[in-house]
Amino acid sequence: MLKLDAVTVRFGGLTALSDVSFEIPQGEILGLVGPNGAGKTTLFNSISGLVKARGQITFDGKNVIRLPLHRRARVGIGRTFQIPQPMHHLSVRENLAVAQVFGAGRYDPKRIDEILTVMELSHKADADAASALALQELKRLEIAKALATEPKLLLLDEVLAGLESNAKRTFMLKLRELHRLFGLTIVIVEHDIETISELCTRAVVLNFGQLIADGTPAEVFANPAVMESYTGTAHA
Amino acid sequence: MSHSASHPAAGSPAGSSTARGIALGAGLLVLALVPLMVGASPYMLGLLISALILAGLALSWALLGNLGGMVSFGHAAFFGVGAYASALLAARLNVPVLLAIPIGGLFATLSSLAMLPALRLSGPYFALAILAYAQIFRILATELDWLTGGAAGLQRFPSLPTVFGLDLSERAGSYVLVLACVVLFALVYVVIRRSHVGTALRAIAESEDATRVVGVNATVLKTWMLLLSAFIAGVFGALNAHIIGFLEPDYAFSGIWSVMPIIAAVFGGYRTVLGPIVGAVVIYLFDQVVAKSLIPVGHQILLGIVLAVMVLVAPNGLSGLVARLFPRSEKHHAEA
């Protein structure tokens, strides 16, 4: 499904990602973990086309590294942002319609209604503007928008952050439901070890832009280097 | 690809909003025909023609600002290029005036192609780039005197013709033609705004990354809006040239044609279709009839005061003020 080969991102003199390589098979739920500044969001940005990267990003057998941002969405790479970025002045339904028309290349109101139902946003669909939504609703809209583009791969950037434990649990169940319903491959950035262990079949750890561990959550979190990177002692 | 979602069902809040818009637009159109029915003086018709020219220009500015979020300080360039191209085609190549006017618009569109690199800029950088660009065309019109007549300008070029017995060069005929063009482009604006492309463009104005990440090619859509906006500005520049019958660089590319549409659109409410049109008519008539009689020299200062008050009291312009004074009924809110 997705193969990263020596993906490197530099911002001036700063190397945000350095030769990151790993593969994600279809249908997997992968946890992408690491301390703040490890390069997790930069990796999402390079996969989705928001920043320029070197190396190879192969999606469904094609190297997409030179594809512009809007074309990545059209080949099936959907993403959310850590801070939800709805199209503020549009209604929830309009947000989804734009995503579907331009991302999936078709307009299907029934499908939009289905996504609204799954994401529990039907009652807000035609409310005045997306900017009026509460945080949880904005997070659901963020995912709904990505789903409307009919992605094969869904990149979720700290979608559970800021939620209290009950809401987090509900959201995790929702992610499992989406994975099953839409046959998605999911990569999720998350700090919480418990969440990753429960939700993901595999975890990849980044630290200072480098991949330092790759395995099942149990294997990864038993790795001393990973725990050191979390406690900040590895590079002291 | 179906676009049915962009046409809300009757009875829905959006549908009733559409019905209100149509009713308001039709009402304003009838109002616009009153001067002809009551036989307004040539002076008053002349003022109204100028106000409608400004309305067309304000509409083209608002289209770019509202759909795509591009703030232009250079619409004088498109206005001037359209004016010169149409006048020269009619004068030198004997192109019929009614054909030369849209071709003038096309020349303005062509001239806007030079602005495409600026689409990568945003906010004040785009505004500054397009401001500088407008100056280039004024200088070209002055320096290319073998073509444009230089600083002396063009005096002898055909005026508007007579069509089906209606002399378009007379005030009443010119008024009808300019009004028809304003209505036509307002309808084009409405159609685009209500399409998915229009919805995406409104979203681009707020958050470009949020739209690009769901597959919107923001650069292409913004390019189309720039080309269309330039075309509309060029057509109104051409109309104005054939109505007033002379052109000189300092007039055709005057900063007034960049600033006045902004004032008119902001005063009327640039996020709506009717706002820039109503704003242009109100602002122009206020300036020419009220402000000039109070302060014959430097009357523009009153325009500045009126605009400042409007921005402070009603940032969304006249249309926002009307919406605030006459809110939608509770029933509509409940439906929402």
Image: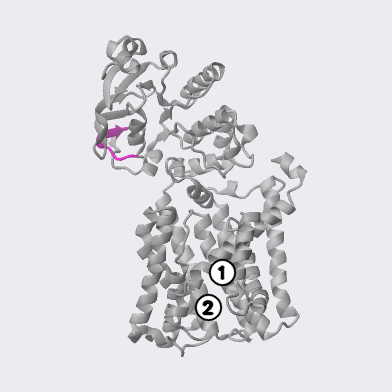
- Pointer 1 residue: B56
Nearer-the-camera pick, B90 or B127: B127
Quarter occupied by the C terminus of chain B: top right
Residue numbers of the magenta segment:
A51-61
Position of residue B244 relative to residue B330, above or below, is below
Q: Position of residue B27 (x, y in %)?
A: 72, 65
| Residue B19 in view here | no
Chain designation of label 2: B
Q: Quadrant of residue B87?
A: bottom left
Chain designation of label 1: B
Q: Position of residue B200 (x, y in %)?
A: 50, 48
Q: Tell which residue pokes out farthest to the bottom in this image.
A: B156
- The local crowd at label 1, few if under 14, some if 14 to 19, many if 20 or more residues have their Cα within 10 Å, is many
Q: Amino acid at mark 1?
A: Gly
- Pointer 2 residue: B239
Point 52% across, 73% down: residue: B236
Position of residue B99 relative to residue A143, above or below, is below
Nearer-the-camera pick, A97 or B271: B271
Residue contact between numbered discs 2 and 1, judged by CB atoms under 8 Å: yes
Considering the numbered disc 1 on the image, is that residue within a helix, a strand or a loop?
helix
Q: Amino acid at mark 2?
A: Leu
Q: Position of residue B148 (x, y in %)?
A: 38, 83
